[in-house]
C-alpha cells in the first residue's frame, strides 16, 4: 500500500489499523535540539481521543504516546522520532455482521477491489483512528514553529452556523464546550442538534475553520507546491473531508476584481484580506484562514440497503460506537495537518 507518508523535509509516515495492537508513526526531518513539551503533546491527543464527551463515539482509549527514538533527555536529536499509540478498547465483534457486506459510503468496496483483502474491523487502515498518529506529529510540528498561532474551531453543524467573523471570536472559549465552537450560544444549539441526531440513529456533517496567525512572509513555492495547494492536500487527506476553501473561497467567484483585490498599505500589509494570507502560492504575512467541510459520518444506526461481496442485495444496520458528528474531534486534526505543512515549508525556506 502506497501513500502512508506526508511532507517533504518534516515528514510523517504512519502505520497501524483501527483494531490492531497499536498505531504509530515515524517523524523524519525534525530539527535537533528542540526541547519537547510532552504535556502539550498529551493535551493534543486528549482533544482528539474518543470517549471524551457524550456527543462523540464512546470507544475508550487513553491514547498515551510511547516514544521509541529520536529524543534524548527531553530534546529532539535530529534522528527519526518513532512512536506508538496502543489500542486497548477494540470491540471487533461489533463488526462481525458486516464481514461480507459493503457499508454504504465507506471504503469497504473499493478497498477490497483494489487490494483483494479487507480488514472489516472498524475499517482497518481506512479508519479515522489513523489520524491519532497525525496529531502526535502535528503537536511536535507546532513546537518547530512556536511563533505561529494555530486556532481551529467548529464553525457549522448542519444548518447551524457561527454568524460572526473570526476576528470577533475568543479562541480561548473553543475548548469550553463539547462541540469546540468559540461562540457559546451557537455551541449550545449545535450540541442540542447533535444529541437529537444521535437519538434518531443518524449523523450530520459540518465545517471546521482554521486561522493561522504570525505566519512569516515567504512560505510556499509558486508553481506546484503552492502553500494553499499543500494545505488543501493536507485537509483533503483527512477522513470524511469533502471540501476545502481558503480566503474568499467560492464566494470570491461571485465578485469583481475591483471588489476582490487586496489594496496594499505602505508597510506591505493589505487593507483587506480576501486572499486569505496567500498570494501566488506564497504567504504574505497576513492571517491565513480556511474552511474544511466534513460529510456526515457514514455509519448510521438505521437499516440501509447494501450489497454483499457476491453482489447480492442485502440489508444492514450500524452497530457499536460511532460519532454522530465528526467535527468536534476533527478540530485538533485540522490544526495538526496545518502545523505540519507550515513546519515543512519553514524548514524548506531554511535551505535557501
Image (cartoon, rainbow, N blue to C red):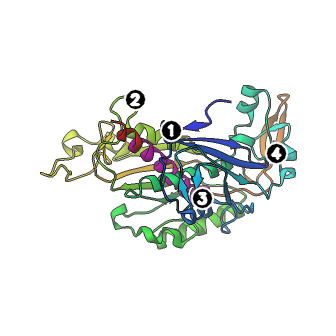
Query: Outermost residue, left direction?
Result: 266
Q: Is residue 68 in sight in this rendering? A: yes
Q: Is residue 298 in sight in this rendering? A: no
Q: Nearer the viewer, residue 68 or 250?
A: 68
Q: Which mark is residue 7?
A: 1
Disc 4: CA contacts within 10 A as few (<14), some (14-19) or many (>=20): many
For the residues marked 4 and 2, what is the alpha-carbon distance in whole angstroms?
44 Å
The reply to whether the magenta stretch includes residue 331 is yes
Q: For this view, does 96 lie left or right of residue 118? A: right
Give the foreground label among 4 and 2: 2
- Of helix, strand and loop, which one carries label 3? helix
Q: Nearer the viewer, residue 328 or 86?
A: 86
At which x and y percent is residue 261?
A: 21, 43
Question: Of marks 1 and 2, which one's residue comes earlier in the chain?
Answer: 1
Mark 2 sits on what residue? 224
Q: Nearer the viewer, residue 78 or 89?
A: 78
Mark 4 sits on what residue? 316
Give the foreground label among 4 and 1: 1
Range of residues picked out in magenta: 326-346
For the residues marked 4 and 1, what is the alpha-carbon distance in whole angstroms?
39 Å
Question: Of marks 3 and 1, which one's residue comes earlier in the chain?
Answer: 1
Amino acid at each position: 500500500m502506497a501513500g502512508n507518508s506526508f511532507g517533504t523535509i518534516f515528514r510523517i509516515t504512519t502505520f497501524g489499523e483501527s483494531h490492531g495492537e497499536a498505531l504509530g508513526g515515524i517523524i523524519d526531518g525534525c530539527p535537533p535540539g528542540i526541547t519537547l513539551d510532552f504535556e502539550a503533546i498529551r493535551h493534543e491527543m486528549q482533544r482528539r481521543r474518543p470517549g471524551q464527551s457524550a456527543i462523540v463515539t464512546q470507544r475508550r482509549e487513553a491514547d498515551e504516546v510511547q516514544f521509541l527514538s529520536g529524543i534524548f533527555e527531553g530534546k529532539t536529536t535530529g534522528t527519526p522520532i518513532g512512536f506508538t499509540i496502543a489500542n486497548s478498547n477494540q470491540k471487533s465483534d461489533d463488526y462481525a455482521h458486516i464481514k461480507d457486506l459493503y457499508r454504504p459510503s465507506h471504503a469497504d468496496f473499493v478497498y477490497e477491489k483494489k487490494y483483494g483483502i479487507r480488514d472489516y474491523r472498524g475499517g482497518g487502515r481506512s479508519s479515522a483512528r489513523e489520524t491519532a498518529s497525525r496529531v502526535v506529529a502535528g503537536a511536535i510540528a507546532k513546537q518547530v514553529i512556536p511563533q505561529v498561532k494555530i486556532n481551529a474551531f467548529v464553525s457549522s453543524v448542519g444548518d447551524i452556523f457561527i454568524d460572526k467573523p473570526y476576528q470577533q471570536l475568543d479562541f480561548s472559549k473553543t475548548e469550553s464546550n463539547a462541540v469546540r465552537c468559540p461562540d457559546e450560544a451557537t455551541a449550545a444549539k449545535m450540541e442540542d442538534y447533535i444529541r437529537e441526531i444521535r437519538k434518531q440513529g443518524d449523523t450530520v456533517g459540518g465545517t471546521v475553520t482554521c486561522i493561522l496567525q504570525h505566519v512569516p512572509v515567504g512560505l510556499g513555492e509558486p508553481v506546484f507546491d503552492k502553500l494553499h495547494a499543500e494545505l488543501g492536500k493536507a485537509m483533503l487527506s483527512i477522513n470524511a473531508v469533502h471540501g476545502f476553501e481558503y480566503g474568499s473561497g467560492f464566494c470570491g467567484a461571485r465578485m469583481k476584481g475591483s471588489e476582490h483585490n487586496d489594496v496594499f498599505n505602505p508597510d506591505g500589509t493589505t487593507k483587506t484580506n480576501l486572499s486569505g494570507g496567500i498570494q501566488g502560492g506564497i504567504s504574505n504575512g497576513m492571517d491565513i484562514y480556511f474552511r474544511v467541510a466534513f460529510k456526515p459520518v457514514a455509519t448510521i444506526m438505521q437499516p440501509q440497503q447494501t450489497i454483499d461481496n457476491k453482489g447480492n442485495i442485502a440489508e444492514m444496520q450500524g452497530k457499536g460506537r460511532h460519532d454522530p458528528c465528526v467535527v468536534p474531534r476533527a478540530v485538533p486534526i485540522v490544526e495538526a495537518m496545518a502545523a505540519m505543512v507550515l513546519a515543512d515549508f519553514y524548514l524548506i525556506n531554511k535551505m535557501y
